[in-house]
Image: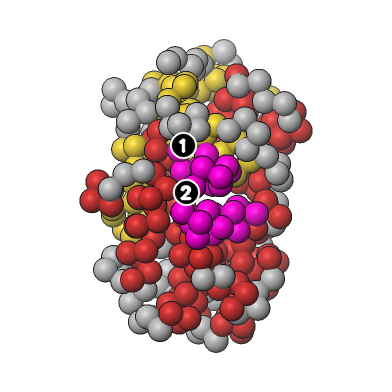
Amino acid sequence: MSSSFIPLVEEYRGGVLENVHYGAISVVDETGKVIYQSGNPEHMTFLRSAAKPFQALPGMKRKIDEVYGLTGKEAALFAASHRGEAFHIEALESILKKTGIAESQLHCCSTYPLNEDAKADRHRNQEAKRRLFHNCSGKHLGLIGLSKHMGWDEDTYYQPDHPVQQEIMTSLAYMADVPPSSIPFGIDGCGLPVHALPLHKIALIYLKLACTDLIADVETRAAAERIARLMNANPDMIADTKFVCSALLKDDNLAAKGGAKGVYGIGLREERIGISLKVSDGSEQVWPCIIATILEKLGYGNQATIDRLYELVPNVIVNDGGTVVGERKPVFSFGM
C-alpha cells in the first residue's frame, strides 16, 4: 500500500473485519493552505470525471448554451456523468438536433446506460448500444459544439493538441495555480485527455468553483459561475436520481463532482473551503460514508445533505435478502 494512503473505512461482517478501504483526504482554505488532511495531500491524482466542470469552461466562456438555444437541463449535461435515464437521453437527443451534431461524431464508444433500470429498459426493448448512452456523451457534445462554433476541426476534438483540449489544459492550470507543463495527462475511459493534480490542488479548484470570487480572470470567473449554477439548478442531470453527485448538488451551498477510481471534489460556499478525496481501490460505494463523515467532522450545518448520503448507502451492510449482516465504519481522523 502506498505511503500516500491511510485506512478510511473498515467493513465488518459478523463482527469480523472483512474489508479496509484506504485513501487520502485534503481540505484547503481560500488561500489554498491545507487545513486538514488524512494521508498525503500531495498525492498526484487523475481527476477523471471530476474534471468535467473544468472541461466545460471553454464552452461556458463562449456561452455555447445560448449560441445553440439550449435549456439549462441540456447545458448541465456538459459537466455530467449522466447514467442514461430516459430524461437524460431525451435532453441529449435535443442537443443533437439543436447543434446539428451527428451522434457518430462522438468519440466515446457505444454502450448501455449505467443506471440499471435504464439499462434493463433498453434491453427489454431490444435496443442496440449507443454512443449517446455513454455517461460522458454530454461532455463530448459540448466540446464538439464549441469546436463547431469556433470553426475548429470537429473530427479531432479529442486529440491533445486540438485547440479545445489546449484550452482545457490552460483553464485547469489557471484554476489550480500551476504551470501547464506540471500537469501530467493520460487518456480517460471515454477517449479524451484526462489530467492529474496533487490532491490538495483538486480541493482548491473545487473551492474556486464554489467561491468564484477567488478567480481573478473575469471571463473564467463568469464561466465557472455559469457551469456551477447549472449543476446546482439541475442536479439530477449530473448523475441520476440515486447517485452521490446529484444528492450533493441538491444543496446550493456545494459544488461537487466525482470521477472514476474513487476521486471526488467538493467546494463549500459559505464555509469557503475545498475538499478532495481519493479512495485507493477506486470504490465509489464508500463515498457517502467518507463524505458524510467529513462534513460531520467539519460541523456542517445542513443535516439534510448528510442524511441524503446515508440514505444512498447506509453504514449498515445488508445481504441480498435485505437482512443486516454487518456495518461500515469510518476510521480516519484529520491531522494538520
The circle drawn on residue 203 is 1
Please tell me whether mark 2 sits on a helix, a strand or a loop.
loop
Residue segment shown in magenta = 203-229
Report helix, strand or loop for mark 1: helix
| Residue at 56% across, 45% down | 213
Residue name at image x 59 percent, y 78 percent: 67
> Does residue 326 belong to the magenta stretch?
no
**Quadrant in which the C terminus is drawn:** top left
Who comes first in sequence, dot 2 or dot 1? 1
Tag 1: amino acid: Ala
Using the rendered view, name the quadrant where residue 229 is placed.
bottom right
Residue 210, how many percent across, how many down? 58, 43
Q: Residue 83: horizontal and vertical position, in percent?
A: 59, 58
What residue sits 54% from the left and 59% below the top? 223
Q: Quadrant of the N terminus?
A: top left
When the figure is inspected, residue 293 is found, relative to residue 144, above or below; the finding is above
Residue situated furthest bottom in the rendering: 100
Disc 2/disc 1 C-alpha distance (Å): 18 Å
Tell me the colour scheme of the image: secondary structure
Which three-letter amino acid code belongs to the residue tagged 2? Ala
Which of the numbered marks, if any, corresponds to residue 142? none
Q: Is residue 331 visible?
A: yes
* Image quadrant in which you'd find residue 21: top left
What crowding class fits label 1: few (fewer than 14 Cα within 10 Å), some (14-19), or many (20 or more)? many
Mark 2 touching mark 1, by CB under 8 A? no
Residue 216 numbered mark, or none: 2
* Residue 221 within the segment the image draws in magenta: yes
Mark 2, Cα crowd under 10 Å, few <14 / some 14-19 / many 20+, is few
Percent of width and height locating residue 55: 45, 59
On the picture, is 80 further left or further right than 44? right
Classify residue 281 as left or right of residue 289. Answer: left
